Image: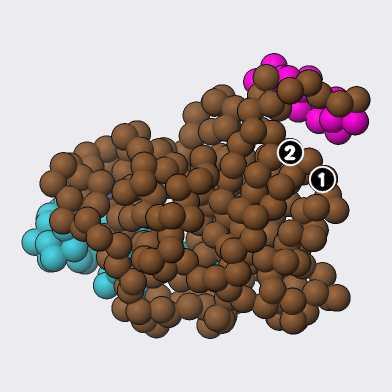
Chain colours: A cyan, B brown
């Protein structure tokens, strides 16, 4: 199936979970990333159980604390 | 209030713009913006807003200028090392534009002082370098119904979003709670290119100017991210539903400000 991750279309295996996608995408600080799918936030406790569907649009939103 | 000849010349490039004009320039001269943090982000914001003729600029920061700040905090100079950042920033802004009144607050923002501090201002700039302050600014702005610009920078990356009451998600809608101390790297640990403050801080200044003159589209409901190494800007649409947010949602559970444990970058706001 095809999904869009951070604006880039990708071919991925069916039944991919958000947790596995976070690993595959080498997400920095995976414990503290905010995930949205099709413009809806995914609760952080449900990454293991959230299964992606064909056509999903996934965004990772990262903490960025600097300003100094 | 009529413009002096000097003002007509100083602001001529604004006045000629149909989106600003004499009317917009008057709005700028009557506007009050508070910048929290006189560091890598706060420096360019303060300089561009002072140059633009924002009539009252407040600047809050508890720290003194350190030599290691000068690689990016362009409002301060070598002669300012050891001086309170708010004083050094005020001197630079006054030299740039005598039209601007600069209010200095040589203090950390806390749950005790922030609501009173922001109440006098039309737009708030988050130029802080730590999550407790970023959440405090967000919650206080939601409670006081003040618009603000959030931004963060690290290494070659930056991001910003704009909150306007009733027009989309707040910072806490997206980021829920501050990460534990040291869980997410700071710029002291990870480094930051000085020009990142210039890029992202200038965008924050642009949001403030657009808000004041009432032109264009603000970065509400979106997070703009910048990756300098890939030279990639992305405007990420944020979920629109804010109902369940603990502070700006329908049934807020956060009704008092919270002082989270300070995990600041290098002692600099
Ligand atoms: Zn919210």
Mark 1 Cα within 10 Å, few/some/many (few <14, many 20+)?
some
Q: Which residue is mark 1?
A: B97
Q: Residue B29 at x, y = what percent? A: 69, 34
Mark 2 Cα within 10 Å, few/some/many (few <14, many 20+)?
many
Instruction: Report if the CB atoms under discs 1 and 2 are less than 8 Å apart.
Output: yes
Residue at the spot 24% in from the left edge and 52% down from the top edge: B247
Q: Chain of mark 1?
A: B
Q: Which residues are magenta?
A: B6-22
Report the front residue among B172 and B101.
Answer: B101
In the visual, does A68 lie left or right of B54?
left
Instruction: Indicate which disc residue B53 carries.
Output: 2
On whether residue B160 falls in the magenta region, the answer is no
> Magenta residues: mostly which secondary structure?
helix
Residue at the spot 44% in from the left edge and 42% down from the top edge: B147
Residue at the spot 56% in from the left edge and 51% down from the top edge: B34
Which quadrant would residue B72 be assigned to in this image? bottom right
Which quadrant would residue B70 be assigned to in this image? bottom right
In the visual, does B89 lie left or right of A17?
right
Q: Residue B226 at x, y = what percent? A: 54, 53
Report the front residue among A30 and B141.
Answer: B141
Q: Quadrant of the C terminus of chain B?
A: bottom right
Q: Quadrant of the N terminus of chain B?
A: top right
* Co-location on one chain, circles 1 and 2: yes
Element on which disc 1 rests: loop
Q: Residue B202 at x, y = what percent? A: 65, 48
Q: Chain of mark 2?
A: B
């Amino acid at each position: 199936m095809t999904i869009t991750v951070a604006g880039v279309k990708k071919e991925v295996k069916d039944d991919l979970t958000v947790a596995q996608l976070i690993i595959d995408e080498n997400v920095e600080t995976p414990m503290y990333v905010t995930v949205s799918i099709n413009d809806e936030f995914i609760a952080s406790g449900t990454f293991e159980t959230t299964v992606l569907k064909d056509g999903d649009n996934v965004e990772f939103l990262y903490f960025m604390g600097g300003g100094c | 209030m009529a413009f002096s000849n000097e003002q007509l010349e100083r602001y001529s490039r604004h006045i000629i713009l149909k989106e600003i004009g004499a009317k917009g320039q008057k709005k700028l001269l009557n506007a009050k913006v508070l910048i929290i943090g006189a560091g890598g982000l706060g420096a360019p914001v303060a300089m561009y807003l002072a140059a633009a003729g924002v009539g009252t600029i407040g600047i809050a920061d508890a720290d003194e200028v350190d030599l290691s700040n000068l690689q990016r905090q362009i409002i301060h100079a070598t002669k300012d090392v050891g001086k309170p950042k708010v004083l050094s920033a005020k001197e630079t802004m006054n030299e740039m534009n005598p039209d601007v009144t600069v209010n200095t607050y040589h203090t950390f923002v806390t749950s005790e002082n922030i609501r009173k501090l922001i109440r006098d201002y039309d737009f708030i700039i988050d130029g802080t370098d730590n999550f407790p302050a970023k959440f405090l600014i967000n919650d206080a702005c939601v409670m006081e119904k003040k618009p603000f610009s959030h931004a963060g920078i690290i290494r070659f990356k930056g991001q910003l979003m704009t909150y306007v009451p009733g027009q989309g998600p707040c910072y806490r809608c997206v980021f829920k709670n501050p990460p534990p101390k040291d869980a997410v790297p700071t710029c002291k640990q990870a480094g930051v290119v000085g020009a990142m403050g210039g890029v992202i801080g200038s965008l924050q200044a642009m949001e403030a100017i657009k808000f004041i003159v009432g032109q264009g589209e603000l970065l509400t409901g979106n997070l703009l991210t910048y990756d300098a190494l890939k030279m990639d800007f992305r405007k990420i649409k944020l979920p629109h539903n804010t109902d369940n947010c603990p502070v700006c949602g329908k049934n807020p559970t956060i009704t008092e400000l919270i002082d989270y444990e300070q995990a600041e970058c290098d002692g600099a706001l």
